[in-house]
Structures are given as structure tokens and as C-alpha cells.
């Protein structure tokens, strides 16, 4: 999902998901199966991607009016804050009362798939929206559990990059961005001092924590679940990966102790104001510019790896971030809903909306537009195509995010308070999280 998703999922989410009966769904009808009883209207829940709910409405309304002009179908829009979106979706799946079409954080895909409420996109359904092969493979990997028909399609794609302050690097005599974590720590120490730090992290944000824990674990050859979907949070690679991230505050001291409490994009502000020289973030450009930072004051490089260059396997350097679009199976306008999905994933709309939001089109042809060839977006586009991997597509993924992300938050708080963070303490925190799954 996007970094704009700031909601905590909680163990109750997983329990709620498992309690929803398969076959229930949202949409404008109340039966278990949808149809076309309301062919002239659609309801759409959009996620908050812009600076505000009103900003999203301003961006989306002209596009919905264009869809109505082309199709004769009027779309009723509601932009739902991230703090409410998942609970709203869960309520709709259990009550059968919800929108026809909705946005979901892509990391929720497998969890929501288990409800049975969302329309599967088999080959025939994909054909109705232009075909499956139009989408980036990495984006499709975050649309549901492997081996099952996806229940969502990619809408906006995001990936992590390493943002660095060009002037602070030059002042410190650093000529290029770090390519490995050892280099990042070395550079970070040179950049730390006088009230400034080498790196800003968002340690109080569970979503940010789980994204980085996932990448560090992958780079140490670990997954948080085995092939059967059982949690393996205490594997040596997972423990080592989490500790390496926490050590930015605990051992390396290149991130400010106060970063352990950051949860509302404060790290963006620190980077933009020059309080931190580096930042790991998704499509940060628009937010940095809103904080007064000019594009020529920063640059973007791939997130470091342990050694070598980013790529598949242990050199994954980002989770596949982004937003998916789904259709409630009991929609009263299934044909119209698919027409709307086709419209929103068309080249024209992909270029326009991803351009507005600073994200990357998951539609291959749209992503090749020159508008997405800025230095920043070129780096992020290459990450999505070559070195990003989806978070585990398992039914309890939302619990995993909350529990492991929360464990990392607690460990960072320990580090900030000066309490020792050891391999044993990391393992103990992750063991506790695993027991709660």
C-alpha cells in the first residue's frame, strides 16, 4: 500500500476477515451474486492519495465526468481516509452493503480475497478490461494469493528509493550515494553531527516498519512465512534483518532517537528541512516540494543492498507498494463496474492520474510515457520492474503487518531509550509476535 496508509490493522482485523462468510459482498444489490439491475449508476470508494480528501475529489471528479460522457454511467464518488478504509471494507463485506468499485492497499489483497466478497479476475474477466498482460508482473503479484485468480487489479504503483540531499553530501565530501548498507552507515556517520543526522526513519509507523523489515529479511535470505503459509518470524535471517534496521538508531546512531516516535510523515519534514541527509521513501517528490524543497536539491538512488546491485532474490530492495482496484461481487452493475475498471486502467487515465499523484503506472505502455522519465521516477520505475517483491500474499497478512511492524516499533523505542537491542531481544520480540498470530 501507499505510505499514505497510516492505519493500524490490529489482530482483530484478521479475526474479522476469517469470520466473514464466503459469498458475501458489497455493491448496490443485497444478494450474494451481482448483476446489472442498476446499469446507469456506480458507487466508487477511492483511497486518499492526495494532500487531502478535497484534493482527491478535485483530481478525480473530471475523470468520472469523462467516464459518464463516454459510457452514460454516473459514478458516485466517496474518498475514504486511510484510517477508515479497511474497517469500511470489512463492514461492507459482512453486511453486503457497499460500493460497486473500490480502492484497496495492495498488501491487503490476499486477506480480502479470503472473504469471497470481491470479483475474481479470471482470464475472461481480464479480457473485459483489456487483458492481463498489460500490467507489470510485479504489480500483479500483489493482487491475491498465488495460484488463485486475483480479486483486484493494479491502479497506482509505488516503490522505495533512497533520497539524498545533494548539498549535505557535497559538504561532507561524499561524491555518490551509497550502494550497500555498509556504505550507507559510513556515509551516515560522516553526515551526523551538529544537530543533523545521516538518515531519517519513521519508527512509530507500523506500515513503514513492516515494509523495511520485509526488505531487510529478504536480503538476509529469509521470508516471514514458509511455503505452507505458516509464520517463521524468528528465522535467523528475519532476526538479523530486523536488527540491522533497528541498529540505525541503536548501534550506528545515524538516525535521531526521536525518529522512533515518528508516525505522521515527520521524516519527510526532517529531510526537506536539512535535519537529515537521507530518507527511504516511496515517491517522496511531491511531498518534499510541498515542504519547500526544490527538485534540484535532492536526488534518488536505489535502496542499498548487502552487496552487489539490486535485483531478484536476496538483492530485493523494495516491497511492491501501491493501490489496487477491486469490484464487489454482488454489484448491481457488474458490466458497468468492469467498464469503469477498464477506463481507470486505460493508458490515458493511467498517465493522467499517476502523473497527478507522483506514482508509476502499473500498465506497461503507460509507464513508458516521457512524463514518467524524470530522474526520480526512472529510478522508481526500474525498481518496480526489476528489484521489488510483494509482501507475503497470505490470509493473515494484515495481522503480520500489525504484529511484526509493532515489534519493530517497540525495538526502536528501546533503542531510543538507550535500552540494549541484541539478537536475543529481537528474537524474543518476534517470537511474541509469532505466538499472537
Image (tube, grey):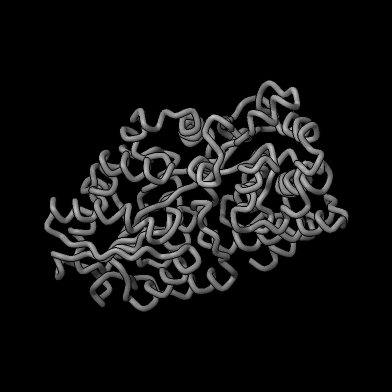
**In the displayed structure, does residue 311 sit left or right of residue 147?**
right
**In the displayed structure, does residue 124 sit left or right of residue 288?**
left
Q: Is residue 62 above or below residue 101?
A: above
**Residue at image point 42% right, 51% down:** 323
**Residue at image point 18% right, 58% down:** 335
- Quarter occupied by the C terminus: bottom right
Q: Position of residue 123 (x, y in %)?
A: 27, 47
Q: Nearer the viewer, residue 343 or 216?
A: 343
Residue 39 picture quarter: bottom left
**In the displayed structure, does residue 395 sit left or right of residue 57?**
right
Q: Nearer the viewer, residue 151 or 288?
A: 288
Q: Position of residue 212 (x, y in %)?
A: 64, 47
Of all residues, the one furthest to the front in this rendering is 292
Residue 389 can be seen in this image: no
- Tally the numbered discs: 0
**In the displayed structure, does residue 359 sit left or right of residue 58?**
right
Q: Position of residue 190 (x, y in %)?
A: 79, 31
Q: Nearer the viewer, residue 405 or 356?
A: 356
Residue 384 can be seen in this image: yes
**Residue at image point 75% right, 41% down:** 197
**Residue at image point 85% right, 51% down:** 422
Q: Is residue 253 above or below residue 437?
A: above
Q: Position of residue 291 (x, y in %)?
A: 55, 46
Q: Nearer the viewer, residue 227 or 192?
A: 192
Q: Is residue 161 above or below residue 43?
A: above
Amino acid at each position: 500500500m501507499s505510505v499514505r496508509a497510516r492505519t493500524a490493522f490490529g489482530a482483530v482485523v484478521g479475526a474479522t476477515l476469517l469470520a466473514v462468510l464466503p459469498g458475501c459482498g458489497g455493491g448496490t444489490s443485497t444478494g450474494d451474486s451481482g448483476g446489472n439491475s442498476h446499469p446507469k449508476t456506480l458507487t466508487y470508494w477511492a483511497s486518499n492519495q492526495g494532500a487531502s480528501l478535497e484534493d482527491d475529489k478535485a483530481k478525480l471528479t473530471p475523470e468520472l465526468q469523462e467516464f459518464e460522457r463516454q459510457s452514460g454511467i454516473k459514478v458516485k464518488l466517496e474518498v475514504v481516509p486511510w484510517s477508515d478504509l479497511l474497517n469500511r471494507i470489512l463492514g461492507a463485506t459482512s453486511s453486503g452493503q457497499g460500493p460497486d468499485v473500490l480502492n484497496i492497499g495492495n498488501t491487503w489483497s490476499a486477506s480480502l480475497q479470503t472473504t469471497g466478497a470481491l470479483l475474481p479476475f479470471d482470464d475472461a474477466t481480464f479480457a473485459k478490461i483489456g487483458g492481463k498482460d498489460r500490467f507489470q508482473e510485479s504489480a500483479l503479484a500483489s493482487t491475491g494469493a498465488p495460484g488463485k485468480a486475483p480479486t483486484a487489479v493494479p491502479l497506482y504503483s509505488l516503490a522505495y528509493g533512497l533520497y539524498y540531499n545533494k548539498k549535505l553530501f557535497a559538504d561532507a565530501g561524499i561524491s555518490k550515494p551509497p550502494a550497500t548498507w555498509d556504505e550507507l552507515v559510513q556515509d551516515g556517520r560522516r553526515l551526523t553531527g551538529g544537530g543533523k543526522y545521516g538518515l531519517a526513519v519513521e519508527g512509530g509507523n507500523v506500515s513503514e516498519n513492516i515494509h523495511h523489515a520485509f526488505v531487510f529479511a529478504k536480503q538476509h535470505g529469509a521470508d516471514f512465512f514458509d511455503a505452507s503459509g505458516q509464520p517463521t518470524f524468528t528465522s535467523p535471517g528475519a532476526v538479523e534483518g530486523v536488527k540491522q534496521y533497528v541498529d540505525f538508531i541503536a548501534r550506528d546512531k545515524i538516525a535521531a532517537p526521536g525518529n522512533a516516535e515518528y508516525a505522521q510523515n515527520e521524516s519527510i519534514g526532517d529531510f526537506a528541512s536539512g535535519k537529515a541527509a537521507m530518507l527511504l521513501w516511496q515517491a517522496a517528490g511531491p511531498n518534499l516540494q510541498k515542504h519547500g524543497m526544490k527538485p534540484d536539491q535532492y536526488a534518488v538512488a536505489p535502496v542499498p543492498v548487502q552487496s552487489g546491485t539490486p535485483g531478484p532474490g536476496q538483492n530485493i530492495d523494495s516491497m511492491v507498494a501501491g493501490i489496487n482496484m477491486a469490484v464487489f461481487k454482488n454489484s448491481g452493475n457488474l458490466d458497468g463496474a468492469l467498464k469503469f475498471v477498464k477506463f481507470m486502467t486505460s493508458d490515458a487515465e493511467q498517465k493522467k492520474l499517476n502523473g497527478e499523484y507522483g506514482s508509476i503506472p502499473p500498465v506497461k505502455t503507460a509507464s513508458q510515457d516521457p512524463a514518467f522519465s524524470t530522474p526520480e521516477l526512472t529510478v522508481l520505475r526500474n525498481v518496480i520492474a526489476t528489484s521489488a517483491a510483494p509482501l507475503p500474499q497470505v490470509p493473515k497478512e494484515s495481522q503480520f503487518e500489525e504484529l511484526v511492524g509493532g515489534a519493530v516499533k517497540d525495538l526502536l523505542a528501546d533503542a531510543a531509550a538507550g535500552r540494549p537491542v541484541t539478537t536475543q531481544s529481537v528474537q524474543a520480540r518476534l517470537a511474541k509476535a509469532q505466538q499472537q498470530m
